[in-house]
Image (cartoon, coloured by chain):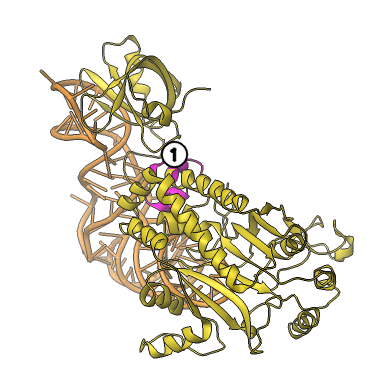
Amino acid sequence: MQESLDQILASDAPRSALTVRGWVRTKRESKACAFLELTDGSCFRGLQVVVDAALPTADLLPQVLTGASVEVTGDLVASPAAGQKWELQATELRLLGVADATYPLQKKGHTPEFLRSIAHLRPRTNLLGNVFRVRSRMAFAIHRFFQERGFFHVHTPVITSNDCEGAGEMFRVTTLKPGSSAPPTEDFFGRPAYLTVSGQLQGEAFACALGKIYTFGPTFRAENSNTARHAAEFWMIEPEIAFCDLRDDMTMAEENVRHLVRVMLEECGEELEFFGRLVDKGLEARLRQTVDKPFERISYSDAVALLQKSGRPFEHPVVWGEGLQTEHERYLAEEHVRGPVTIHDYPKAIKPFYMRQNDDGRTVAAMDLLVPGIGEIIGGSQREERLEVLLEAMRAHGLSEQDYGWYVDLRRYGSVPHAGYGMGFERLLMFVTGVSNIRDVIPFARTPGHAEY
RNA sequence: UCCUGAGUAGCUCAGCGGUAGAGCGGGUGGCUGUUAACCACUAGGUCGUAGGUUCGAACCCUACCUCAGGAGCCA
């Protein structure tokens, strides 16, 4: 396998007779020579290749347009011009694959909307290339974070028959013919089945066996959401921890976010510089503040009082017992705290049945971690571990014990206090890259009306 | 799904009632090493779709489609 360009660019001495392969990002021609900027995807920076016009293979140059793939042999020498440390003085140029004039990517800025219409080519751009290199490193950092803390990675099912109540509409999975009136008992699984909206319930089963677990996989929501922060298919990280209460859960969530931001700062410097320059000027300062300053915590009740006293003319009234609206969350994270903030202990009426009821009888041990610009990046709770209280909550939510029998069993046999949360991977990526649309941090976005690739 | 805005060359946009424009990208030529190079010339468009108003519509009106921003739902 060929040495990648990021390794070659990190050379500390000139080298001769080097062969590199990659795609042409730009070509600049003059009478005596042509300059190709070559990239192989291994890093943001490209390698400048100098092709002398006198070279026998220089007659290939007219066919070498932006997007073409080439193989170049030459000597790596210190570049006499400013702009790059090294350049490859070509001795031989070979054209591997042409890219003709219809190649849509140019050496200029494109709008994100246009790039979404060519999702198969956009990872070749600077912006999306950087996003997806960061995405890969963040995914690895997430596994590192949990593995280093003794968590086991559990592969929860993608197809499931129980909805994690409150999580949203589900996609039906069926082998019945369209329009069939056959009952679900005739279907492949003998019951209605769906794409998972969360691995939490199964995660709880494993936390109550292995202690500390996490899932990291795709989840699906059939909501007709048309926003920059929602996708029908997205990736979620869901730790679940036995012998853990809400306070420890919040601490874990905060550490998790801070750790990943630190990885961005320490391991993605080249990409961070690019995002700071072309996507979001305040990015680095915001990330630095995130790792330097402790996260704030505000109880839901205090948050309501604070919003009411703010004197802000909110469009939606602030009422205890109602969910916080986007404008409220934005005020809390972006103006009141000016940084990440965790809101905890929400009214039980607006939260799912599995959250642990507090002693006040009207709130549950729930928490949402909000970050500026994005809003909720994590949602979690301590789970109800008391059998009778859980059954009562299920009745109140109109759920049958039969449908959740296995879940209730976890409270019947060796029940323990436990807690967990879900972190939206794409929202995290938006936070650390400054990219403002979820469709631009996921390789092939699935949103209402869109599954083209 | 609701509200607002926008659809003009491959891309980014200007033109807003009187014969369709620029920059980039492509082609040709030029240029002592360029950095989104530069200079000159050149090809490229049923102005989102369908109706309507008008002597005349890219421009005004209606409907639909698509996209964006905001809202709801949530990760």
Rendered view: A89 above or below A380:
above
Q: Which residues are magenta?
A: A110-129
Residue positioned 55% across, 57% down in the render: A425
Horizontal side of residue A21 vs A203, given as left or right: left
Q: Which chain is represented by yellow in the image?
A: A
**Is A358 in the magenta?**
no
Task: Give the residue type that dot 1 points to.
Answer: Arg
Provide residue A199's location: percent of width, then percent of height: 69, 61
Query: For this rendering, which residue is in front, A195 or A290?
Result: A290
According to the image, label 1 marks what residue? A124
Q: Is residue A448 visible?
A: no
Which residue is painted at 32% across and 15% down in the image? A58
Tell me where residue B74 appears, x and y as whole percent. 59, 70
The magenta stretch spans residue A113: yes
Q: What residue is rendered at 60% in x and 60% in y? A: A232
Image quadrant assignment for residue A233: bottom right
- Near-viewer residue (A423 or B5): A423
| Rendering quarter of residue A35 | top left
Is residue B64 shown left or right of residue A266?
Answer: right
Q: Mark 1, residues whose alpha carbon is within 10 Å: few (<14), some, or many (≥20)?
A: some
Tell me where residue A229 appears, x and y as whole percent.
50, 64
Quadrant housing residue A165: bottom right
Chain letter belonging to callout 1: A
Task: Identify the residue at horizontal 54%, vertical 67% (top origin).
Answer: A251
Relative to B74, does residue A291 appear above or below in the rendering? above
Q: Residue most toward the top? A: A56
Residue A190 x, y percent position in the rendering: 88, 61
Which colour represents chain B? orange
Mark 1 residue element: helix
A363 lies left or right of A393: left
Query: What secondary structure characterizes most of the magenta part?
Result: helix
